Image (cartoon, rainbow, N blue to C red):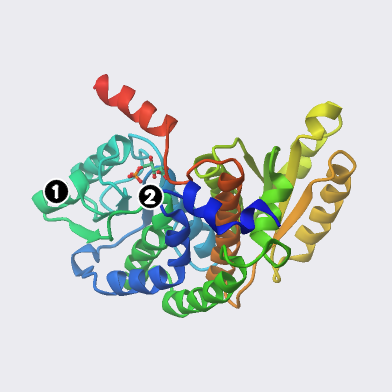
Amino acid sequence: MSLLDDPELLRRIDRGGMGRVLERWPEALLDALRIGGRLDVSQQKKDVKAVVWVGIGGSAIGGDLVKGWASDRSPLPIEVCRDYHLPHYAGRRTLTVGVSYSGETPETLNAFKEALGRGGPVIGVSSGGALEKLCAQKRALHAKVPGGLAPRGALPYLMVVPLLALAKLGLVGGVEEEILDAHETLKELRERLRPTVPTPQNEAKRLALGVAGTLPLIYGFREFTPVAYRIKTQINENSKTLSKAEALPELGHNEVEGWVGVPKDLASRLSVIFLRTPTEPQEIGVRIAAVKEIVSKRTKRVFEIRASGRTKLAQILSAIFVGDYLSYYLALLNRVDPTTLTNIPKVKRKVSQRR
Ligand code: PA5
């Protein structure tokens, strides 16, 4: 029996309950749809020319995912700002969406205050904290998402609620239908990924065992570039493991050359996960095959995550769901609680002492 099939081990290590959070994702999507549906964006209806999504870490990735998803349908540029300052161009006709799960992240609060100062429309999204208070003080629109989660576990809320706001403003279409499709897709996937499904039938457990003890390289493309990055950051935060994300076709023009000189002992400690989709363009499929052939000569640990679902949003979230479960099981193999963080709060404390 694989370690991952021992329910007692899971209970002992997953003290923060990340497994329960993942289990609820399909329902969280519907809950987020309801929260977003109640937003009154009438005050935000100005002549918006650009969208800036301000946030960090688990509160920023939803912006990258929305940007990737909307790339073939949004008439406006969407930029994600992970820093203290807004881009110079952001002004009265820029919609700023400030997302911070805790509502306390200094980089996000600072950039959001800049947006208020520049006079453009703003929306704050948090579970409370200083961001909620600031929005109340300035009479700015705020969407409150449920508290008590790790920010990265709250992705269904942190992605879908702002997305609904963009839909209500008429900036993107087809959102509700795709969220419902994502809900159905994740419900089906949950039946195959949850802890009670034994390793031989459980793709995420098998992936975790495959990449255990290695540095996983996640290779994405187009709208799956932020998916690769999300999986990398989940492996960092949940599994306490270094990981790296790259994207095709770019990596075929640089990273792939690095495999020529990779020392043998290092190559055997690297694993590669390619992200694939049923709707993947032919030019990408051909590139994946070419790169796969090269890396397979240096490491045996080469894997794929295949997205499922009918719509683009469902496909994006399905690959993330597999990746999140993979990072969860890898944490259990590493005997670390996926929820508890060590170095991130350390850095936050040092920064706050210096302010
Ligand atoms: O996943 C995490 O815990 C982090 O990446 C946080 O999202 C990040 O530190 C920012 O905090 P917040 O999401 O509360 O703004």
Residue at disc 1, secondary structure: helix
Q: Where in the figure is residue 159, as x and y percent of width and height?
A: 41, 60
Residue in the foreground of this view, choosing between 24 and 145:
24
Q: Is mark 2 within 8 Å of ligand 1?
A: yes
Question: Between residues 238 and 279, which one lies in front from this camera angle?
Answer: 238
Location of residue 1 with respect to 178 vertically, above or below: above
Query: Which marked residue is nearer to the observer: mark 1 or mark 2?
Result: 2
Image quadrant of residue 325? Answer: bottom right
Residue at 74% of width from left, 43% of height from top?
271
Q: Amino acid at mark 2?
A: Pro
Query: Circle 1 is placed at which residue position?
Result: 133
Q: Is residue 42 visible?
A: yes
Kindly indicate the quadrant of the structure image that contains residue 192. Answer: bottom right
Identify the residue shown where x is 57% and y is 62%: 195
Q: From the image, which quarter does the C terminus lie in? A: top left
Residue 72 lies, in percent from the top left, at: 55, 66
Q: Which residue is mark 2?
A: 151
Residue located 45% across and 65% down the image: 75
Specify whether 35 is left or right of 70. Answer: left
Some atom of ligand 1 lies within 8 Å of the CB belonging to the residue at label 1: no
**Can you see residue 254?**
no
Q: Name the residue at 33% across, 34% down.
A: 84
- Ligand 1 lies in quarter: top left
> How far is mark 1 from mark 2, CA to CA?
19 Å
Crowdedness near tag 1: few (<14), some (14–19) or many (≥20) residues, C-alpha within 10 Å: some
